[in-house]
Structure formats: structure tokens, C-alpha cells
């Protein structure tokens, strides 16, 4: 962003007007001079390039506590109903049959089929 000298002078003049208006406003509202100087420094700081600290989170401690309580209540309902992820992990712990598994006979049959397929490829190759 290339600025001419005239544009820079105009920007400085506008900044001075803003500062004087801000100080007049603070004097009318009874604000302290330290807050007005801090506001001026903050306003004068460049806004590009991550010079300042990044704000973390936007929740108060009470808000986080409400969300945590709601999550605990939700999981309590899921566990009480016996559905969802809680039931899968409890099925593994209790020794229940795992879904989607293959029996020993099925595994043996697949193995024989694969061996036959690879033997046919070897014969075709050579």
C-alpha cells in the first residue's frame, strides 16, 4: 500500500482530531485519563500482522460448567438406555460376540479361494 505524503499528512490530522474528540468525550463522561491514553495507543497500533495476543475461548467459567453438566447428563442417558458407543464398549468387556466377525470355517474357505486364485495366476504367468 503506497501512500503519498499528502495522504499521510491527512491521516495524521484525522488521527489528531480523533484523539482530541476522544479526550473531550472522556472528560464529559468522567473517564480517567489513563483509559483514554490506553485507548489511543490501542487505536494507533497497526492492525495487520499478528502482533497482539490471540484471545482464547469466549466462554465464562459458568458457561463451560453448564456445557460440561449437559454433556454428563447426555452420557448418563445414553448409558442408562444401553445404546450408542457405551453399549459397544460394554459388550466387549462382558465378552459379547463382536459384530462383523468371520467364523473359522469362513476364514478357512477364503484362504483356500485366495490360494487357488494365486495358483491360477502363477500358472497363467508361466
Image (cartoon, rainbow, N blue to C red):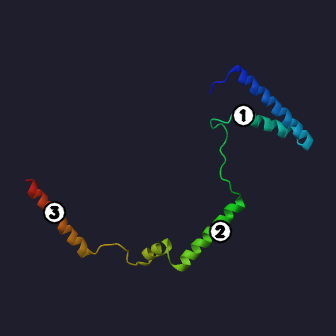
Residue ID for mark 1? 45
Q: Is residue 44 above or below residue 113?
A: above
Q: Quadrant of the N terminus?
A: top right
Query: In the rendered image, which quarter is residue 70 located in?
Result: bottom right
Is there CB contact under 8 Å for labels 2 and 1?
Answer: no
50 relative to 69, above or below: above
Label 2 neighbour load within 10 Å: few <14, some 14-19, many 20+: few
Mark closer to the chain start, 2 or 1: 1
Indicate which disc residue 81 carries: none
**Label 2: which secondary element:** helix
Inter-mark Cα distance, 1 to 3: 72 Å
The residue singled out by tag 3 in the image is 117
Give the camera-side residue of 34 and 15.
15
Among the two numbered marks 1 and 3 on one chain, the one whose residue lies closer to the N terminus:
1
| Residue behind mark 2 | 69
The CA span between labels 3 and 2 is 57 Å
Relative side of 104 to 47, left or right = left
Left or right: 79 in relation to 18: left
Q: Residue at x 72, y 24 (%)?
A: 8
Amino acid at each position: 500500500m503506497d501512500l503519498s505524503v499528502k495522504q499521510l499528512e491527512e491521516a495524521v490530522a484525522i488521527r489528531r482530531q480523533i484523539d482530541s474528540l476522544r479526550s473531550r468525550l472522556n472528560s464529559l463522561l468522567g473517564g480517567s485519563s489513563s483509559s483514554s491514553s490506553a485507548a489511543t495507543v490501542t487505536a494507533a497500533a497497526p492492525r495487520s500482522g499478528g502482533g497482539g495476543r490471540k484471545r482464547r475461548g469466549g466462554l465464562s467459567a459458568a458457561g463451560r460448567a453448564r456445557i460440561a453438566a449437559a454433556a454428563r447428563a447426555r452420557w448418563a442417558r445414553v448409558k442408562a438406555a444401553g445404546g450408542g458407543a457405551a453399549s459397544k464398549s460394554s459388550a466387549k468387556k462382558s465378552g459379547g460376540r463382536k459384530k462383523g466377525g468371520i467364523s473359522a470355517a469362513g476364514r478357512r474357505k477364503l484362504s483356500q479361494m485366495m490360494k487357488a486364485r494365486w495358483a491360477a495366476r502363477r500358472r497363467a504367468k508361466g
